[in-house]
Amino acid sequence: MPEPWDSHQFVEQVARARGRRIHLSAVPAEVMDDKTCGLWVNADSEDYLLYSEDSPAWHADLVICHELSHMLFEHDLEVTTGQQPAPARQPTDVDGLAAFLPDLDPDAVRSVLGRSGFTARREFEAEYLATLILDRATSSGNDSRQTRMLSTFLGADTR
């Protein structure tokens, strides 16, 4: 993890580890629905991670780490392994959201959004790992259980 903590550098580290470019964009809150703080769109060869530009820095970091955690857990593979995703919530302004995904056809964006919901378990896993990542980034890092879990997903050197 970057030291000092920098969420944008962490995004780059995850992108390198996954071998896929990640486009990170802060978007106007009005293009997301009231319950959506962030969104990961897994395109064919790259990823798009969107979060509300109205989020305070600490919350933006949490949202970014949450979406990165979905990537690290490979939650996008759950549909192909037989697990049923939760119903997806549609952003209130799909066309507005599509403007932040310029390399994707707006119909493809609608299609991805229609199948992008995760189960409650997947959401818990992503939130838990995001919390561990940020806790580690802002603490002394002396918790051995935390160190073991983070090293599983982030590699041996987590500090």
Image (cartoon, rainbow, N blue to C red):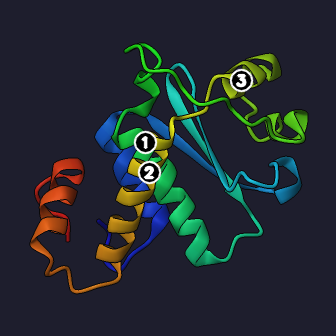
Q: Could you classify mark 1 by the number of other residues whose Cα lies within 10 Å: few (under 14), some (14-19), or many (20 or more)?
A: few
What whole-number distance in Å separates the C-alpha atoms at marks 1 and 2? 5 Å
What whole-number distance in Å separates the C-alpha atoms at marks 3 and 2? 21 Å
What whole-number distance in Å separates the C-alpha atoms at marks 1 and 3? 19 Å
Instruction: Identify the residue at image location x=19%, y=67%.
Output: 146
Q: Earlier in the sequence, mark 3 or mark 2?
A: 3
39 vs 108: above or below: below
Residue linked to disc 3: 114
- Mark 3 or 2: in front is 2
Residue linked to disc 2: 124
Residue 73 figure quarter: top left
Kind of residue at badge 2? Phe
Q: State if disc 2 and disc 3 touch (CB < 8 Å).
A: no
Instruction: Identify the residue at image location x=74%, y=25%.
Output: 109
Residue 5 image position (x, y, % from top left) = 39, 75
Residue 102 figure quarter: top right
